[in-house]
Image (cartoon, grey):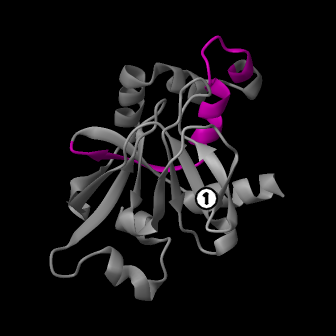
Amino acid sequence: MANELNRYFKQDEDVGVLSITTGQLTIARIPSSSSPDWIVPQALILSIDNYDERIWNYLWRGQEVPVYHLLPKDEQPTHLVVLESVTDIHRLALQIHGEVTFHSVRIADLKDADDATYQAELATNYPDLLTALNAPDDALVESSRAPNLADYSLQHAYISQPVMLAGELCVVADLDKLSHFLVDLDS
């Protein structure tokens, strides 16, 4: 788990992410309206800005940053979370509804969720997401009655690892893969 969270940093920067004296990692829990919340290291967050209009690109400090939505199309956004990446070009923003919370955790507090646990949590709390993930093809997802199923299958492509945090399902996203997709899509 630690490798997943720290892989966005160079080896010499890992000390700033994981405290040597306490073994604590400060993480941000980013709310997602239609799927488990996302977890990212706090050090990756460049800014959290109030923003209530749905947008696809955000002008942040003179740089146009692509936006990925963690909320359904019909839900009012409240914030943009701008995240650092490997290069300036690959920075991205997450548009959300709700508040980002910060937690100081030990790596041992983040438990990898096995597939059975992940499926059970999705069935209980996110049945539309589970339907999309189990759909045999994108056509079924597109024609489904449930809103935003197409978004679910896209979102699942960027899930790196489901984890349990304090007994709740969260996910660690593959931000590198997501940022490259958004930059390629934008250009």
SS at mark 1 in the image:
strand
Q: Could you say where residue 11 lies in the image, as x and y percent from the top left?
A: 44, 85
Magenta residues, as a range?
A: 141-166
Residue 20 % position (x, y): 22, 81
Residue 152: within the magenta? yes
Left or right of residue 133, residue 112 in this image: left
- The mark tally for this picture is 1
Q: Residue furthest left?
A: 22
Q: Quadrant of the N terminus?
A: bottom left
What is the x, y in percent for residue 77?
Answer: 53, 36
Q: Is residue 174 above or below residue 127?
A: below
The residue where tag 1 is placed is 92
Q: What crowding class fits label 1: few (fewer than 14 Cα within 10 Å), some (14-19), or many (20 or more)?
A: many
Amino acid of disc 1: Leu
Answer left or right for 7 relative to 91: left
Is 16 rendered above or below residue 103?
Answer: below
Q: Position of residue 35 (x, y in %)?
A: 47, 33
The vertical placement of 34 against 176, above or below, is: above
Residue extending furthest bottom? 12
User: Quadrant of residue 74 in the image?
Assistant: top right
